[in-house]
Image: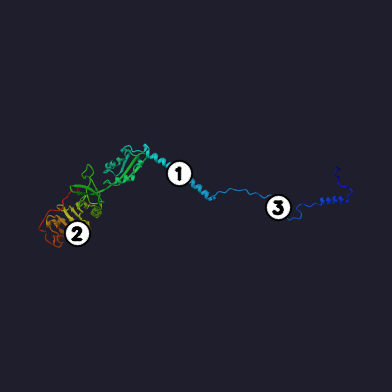
Amino acid sequence: MARNQGPPSDDPFYRRGQTARNSYADDSLPLDAGLTDDEDEDEQNQFRRANKRVSVRRSALPKKTASRMRAVAAVVLTLAVLAVAGFESYRFATHSWRFRVRSENDVQVGGEASKSRAQVLEKMREDVGRNVFQIPLAERKRELEKIPWVESAAVIRLWPNQLRVVVKERTPVGFVALGERVELVDAQGVLMEMPSGTQGDGYSFPVILGMNENEPLSTRAPRMRAYMRLMRELDEGNGAQGAQYSRNIDEVDLSDPEDVKVLAKGGSAPILLHLGKENFLSRFMVFLSNVQKWEQERGKLESVDMRYGREVILNPDTHVATPPAAAGAAKTDGTEKNSEPAVPSKPRHRAVKKRK
């Protein structure tokens, strides 16, 4: 088989094509000749592989919501830790022997408790042997304030196993006759037994009549307000003289709120005065200024009614009640209007306890 040989050198067509190719090679144009920039770019993009998008995994919740939930979870976790710690601390505090009241020496009584100390300790003795954190302080406070001598009380825990009771006692303002028994009473009408070992020593009060130990406090309270107003007027209306006219009173009868009656000193013997419900000081001063004159003119006086202004009735309790004009009356200047009643009788009230 014959070998392929190139074209003959004397072929004109061959030489002409060779020349054309050489001219073309010398004057060759770039591939993008004649194309604009946009066409060039579009042409390049036509054969360029498309960029593959990178997939990004996104959360189902927005970032703001997710951050809030993380904060809430942190708070819940913190609270749970604190709750567990608190529970363990509480269990330790309420069951450990270190916080147990061992004896009465672990109970301190302070404040004004000279009269009620024994009763307070008796009430707190129930808590000896108990854990201080298991003792209901509010309940103990209520129980202590039921003691007649205790006006207010506060119970405090002291670290690690003690209690402190702070007591404010009531202030007595008078003696109260209850049958054959005499007790003390404060300004609110609360009755108190005499302190043990005393019989009223150290007190100087009138004896109050007209009260019953079985009557409610709401009944005694308004009567005691009238009594306190009487004592205040007799002692505070004396100016710079400093005289306390309440010391002239042995008994105060509060059975009739419209007529406060007192057994007063000033004459030859204690005299029962009807002072009404007001102007106690002025009426008592009229009595002190005229009692000696009345006794000189009338003899012994047992009672005087001071409720009718400047006109008084002498010995009104020795006969059946009559109008002021018909009874044994006298003006405050000593001028007699009517004769003294003819039928005398004994005084209605007797002093239960004389004042010092």
In the picture, the disc for residue 80 is 1
> How far separated are the C-alphas under marks 3 and 2?
129 Å
Residue 26 lies, in percent from the top left, at: 82, 50
Residue under label 3: 46
Q: Position of residue 119 (x, y in %)?
A: 27, 42
Report the mark closest to the observer, 2 or 1: 1
Closest to the camera, between mark 1 and mark 3, is 3
- Mark with earlier residue (1, 3): 3
Above or below, comparing residue 33 to residue 121 in the picture: below
Secondary structure at badge 3 equals: helix
Give the mark nearest the N terminus, 2 or 1: 1
Residue 17 visible in the shown view: yes
Hey, which residue is sitting farthest left in the picture? Answer: 342
Residue 153 visible somewhere in the drawing: no
Q: How many marks?
A: 3
The residue nearer to you, when weighing 291 against 209, is 209
Q: Amino acid at mark 1?
A: Ala
User: Which of marks 2 and 3 precedes in the sequence?
Assistant: 3
**What's the amino acid at mark 3?**
Gln
